Image: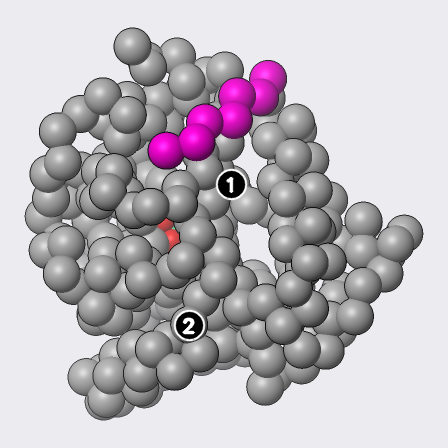
Amino acid sequence: IKMQHVKDYGEMSQKAAAFFYEAIHSNPKIHLGMATGGTPSGMYQELIHKLTEHPLPLGAIKTFNLDEYVGLTQDDPNSYYTFMRETLFAPLKLSRNQTYVPDGRTTDHEAECTRYENLLDTHGIDVQLLGVGANGHIGFNEPGTPFHSTTHVVQLNPSTREANARFFDRQEDVPTHAITMGIASILKAKQIVLLASGETKSEAIFQLLNGTMSEEWPITALQHHPDVTVMVDEAAASKIL
Ligand code: F6R
């Protein structure tokens, strides 16, 4: 695991954006695994800024998101699709046929999970961006998720629903289920870049670097991946031994 220590969220966002800019620069057909949430938002902003100042051809890149809420339409203001469209796809003018997000509206969840996993297998992800939950979840793979899991439907932990409630008008509006790439799906990426900022992530970062590999801490699945870079700020790194 390669560690990159930064001071704070701002520096993490800049360094991560520089990394992704270079990745796109060196491979105009790159397949990027994308995450939502607070962690990558600053990075996306910085990346858009860089690409506006020094444009790169983006027509051949493809993006694949980690997860989506079940039951929300793509146009729902709280769907991860909407988040991605507003934060990244629209500003970069990425088209629908180069941006993949699991479909949370489907009634046949099994079929959607199989379809999405096949999509990942067909295209392959070059660089997967990850955030991490306070309990060590990656994607929506909560503690206890088998490491061999592929794309599947999950019931969200109360703590995760609470953490995500800040994006919704009311706590009870937070969906109870999501479709997520599994741990095995994530590990298939050639390279993984995990970002962590803030004290709430420090225990998960400690487990990744100093803990035993265990399904109780999903993030520890990354311990044996051959190419992981972790960008942590001072607060998130505060528990590392
Ligand atoms: C989002 C995702 C989640 C988040 C995690 C941290 O697509 O897969 O695992 O990365 O919940 O969320 P934030 O960044 O909001 O702290």
Question: Within the magenta stretch, is there residue 5?
Answer: yes
Residue at 25% x, 70% y is 151
Q: Which residue is mark 1?
A: 39
Side of 15 where 215 appears, left or right = left
Residue 159 in percent (x, y) is at: 25, 41
Mark 2 secondary-structure assignment: loop
Q: Which residues are magenta?
A: 1-7
Label 1 – label 2 distance at C-alpha: 24 Å
Side of 72 where 9 appears, left or right = right
> In the rendered structure, which disc, 1 or 2, sits on the residue that comes first in sequence?
1
Q: Residues within 10 Å of mark 1 (few under 14, many from 20)?
A: many
Residue 179 in percent (x, y) is at: 29, 69
Between residue 180 and residue 164, name the one nearer to us.
180
Quadrant containing the C terminus in the rendered view:
top left
Residue at 19% x, 84% y is 110
Residue at 64% x, 44% y is 19
Q: Which residue is mark 2?
A: 124
Between residue 224 and residue 12, name the one nearer to us.
224
Residue 135 in percent (x, y) is at: 24, 35
The amino acid type found where label 1 is placed reads Thr
119 to 177, vertically: above or below: below
Q: Residues within 10 Å of mark 2 (few under 14, many from 20)?
A: some
Which label belongs to residue 86? none
Ligand 1 under 8 Å from disc 1 Cβ: yes
Q: Quadrant of residue 194?
A: top left
Side of 199 where 152 appears, left or right = left
Count of all numbered marks drawn on residues in the image: 2
**Of labels 1 and 2, the one closer to you:** 2
Ligand 1 under 8 Å from disc 2 Cβ: no
